Image (tube, helix red, strand yellow):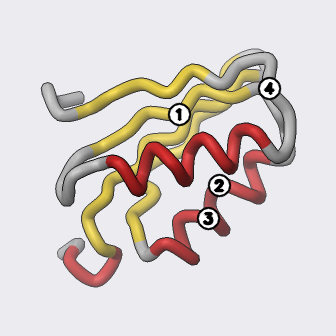
Amino acid sequence: MNSKTRTLNLLGFFCPIPINETRIALVECADGETIEVLCDDHETLRDIPLLCERMGVTLLSVKEDAGEYTFLISKTKTSEVM
């Protein structure tokens, strides 16, 4: 991760808080900034990719480890990748 990556720790929070907090963080991000979102709500596996699609940002990766999910999201517009 580069220096422009910030972490949003949403462990222990359930719908709709992870989605609302991720949306707010993305609105506050500068173009090109990346956020790492940590969640343990299984619903985020469906909801965060949908949020990224609606907002037109890029979901770079999703990782799962022992019931915790890490989403890496770039505020780079999907059409700007590649």
How far apart in space, not on screen, are marks 3 and 4 (Cα)?
Answer: 17 Å
- SS of the residue at dot 3? helix
How far apart in space, not on screen, are marks 2 and 3 (Cα)?
Answer: 5 Å
Residue at the spot 66% in from the left edge and 68% down from the top edge: 50
Rendered view: 19 above or below 1: below
Residue at the spot 45% in from the left edge and 44% down from the top edge: 25
For marks 1 and 3 on the same chain, the one whose residue lies earlier in the sequence: 1
Residue at the spot 53% in from the left edge and 40% down from the top edge: 71
Which sits in the foreground, 67 or 31?
31
For marks 3 and 4 on the same chain, the one whose residue lies earlier in the sequence: 4
Q: Mark 3 points at which residue?
A: 51
Q: Mark 2 points at which residue?
A: 48
How far apart in space, not on screen, are marks 1 and 4 (Cα)?
Answer: 12 Å
Q: Which amino acid does label 1 sit on?
A: Val
Picture disc at residue 14: none
Q: Which amino acid does label 3 sit on?
A: Leu
Picture disc at residue 13: 4
- SS of the residue at dot 1? strand
Residue 21: % across, % down: 60, 41
